[in-house]
Amino acid sequence: TGINFDGNDIENLPPELVKKGRNKVLEYWHSLSHGESFPVNEFKLILVGDGGSGKTSLLKRITTGEFDINEKQTHGINIQSWRLKRDEKEVSANLWDFGGQEIMHSTHQFFLSNRSLYIVVIDSRREEKVEYWLKHIEALGGNSPTIIVINKIDENAGFDVNRKFLLKKYPNIFAITKVSCSTGEGLEALISAIKGALDNVSHLNTLWPKSWFLLKQRLETINENFISITKFHELCKEFEIYSTASQSTLLDFFHDLGVMLRFKDFGLNDTSVLNPHWVTEGVYRIINSKKLAEHLGILKYELLESILPKEIYPRPQHNFLVSLMEKFELCYKITTDAMLIPDLL
Ligand code: GDP
Ligand code: MG
């Protein structure tokens, strides 16, 4: 049941499909060879913006209709699911909301994926660096559509951003809307904008064979912080997903849906993260460690053993964390056995 793309296979495919690229071919092939297939119907909605702008309030308003004037500061990552109606069908969204401290901004970059929908929340009572967020999305979010939400208009209705300038400079901006999480004003328009933007979240209508959904469900029930790539391949085989092309397509998909965090870059290949908190906590532990302060920002790799609890962060995963920090410029390798961690606080 594996898929091979040698010359013969390609010749037997509709040419218009081949032109669309490998993923389209794969999808087609699967729907043929497995009979049953279904649209993905799920996406990741990522809320970004400065601390205090109202990300958590917006998430609550959208998912429960509630508002709390004393909303507590978010720590780490808050993930909620939300179902919305789109053309008579239900679509599920995984909403990702991040805590606001500066140090956290840097680790949140790990989770800015392609094929997602972004909402940049800004506080109309403050002049905010909306471009800071737009640049991050541009760098890490691929062609994902973005909605700018100007919040707290109950307190400053007149505030606006330089729409013309932003729309020209960032073509991924799908809409700019004004809301108040407090009064609920503008929320309906925002939800319509979200639905509209979904047309640009390309994978929603992609067809998956049933086995892919079953594998996804299986991954979601695994109670581990991470799995190795070998284990992932074994799981694929359990669900009769044999070809390396499908396995690698799935890894990308799972990454973008937020099911699993996985970086293809060198050195990061062996670990796929199932629990996002595991990564951020590991990085915080390193950055906030006493040892690091004592050594003026220079940390020998061997010290990681005393910083990271072994049961949670086994030795082979140290390299994963360090490579990830390097990739996102949270640290720099300075010698073969030590790294420099700039002051992020
Ligand atoms: P976050 O850090 O981006 O998650 O922001 P929060 O959702 O925690 O909101 C920060 C503060 O602003 C909280 O006290 C909220 O109650 C308040 N807040 C959020 N949205 C609004 C709004 O539309 N109007 C007003 N007046 N306050 C709001
Ligand atoms: Mg919050």
Image: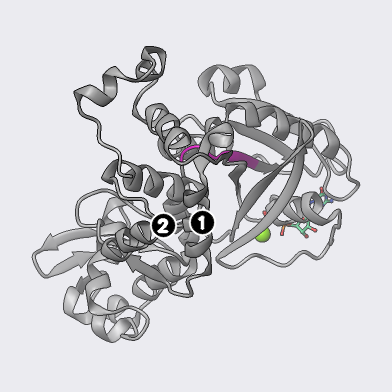
Q: Secondary structure at mark 2?
A: loop
Task: Give the quarter of the image for residue 308.
Answer: bottom left
Mark drawn on residue 214? 1
- Inter-mark Cα distance, 1 to 2: 7 Å
- State ligand 2's quadrant: bottom right
Q: Residue at x 47, y 51 (%)?
A: 211
Residue type indicated by callout 1: Leu
x and y, in percent, of residue 110 in the image: 42, 53
Q: Amino acid at mark 2?
A: Phe
The answer to whether residue 304 is above or below residue 276 is below
Residue 32 image point, x, y percent: 45, 33
Q: Is residue 301 above or below residue 27?
A: below
Seen at 31% across and 50% down, the residue is 242
**CB contact under 8 Å: marks 1 and 2:** yes
Q: Which residue is mark 2?
A: 239
Q: Which residues are magenta?
A: 114-120
Q: What element does badge 1 sit on?
A: helix
Asked whether residue 315 is in view, the answer is yes
Residue at image position (13%, 61%) is: 334
Sequence-earlier tag: 1 or 2: 1
Q: Is mark 2 within 8 Å of ligand 2?
A: no
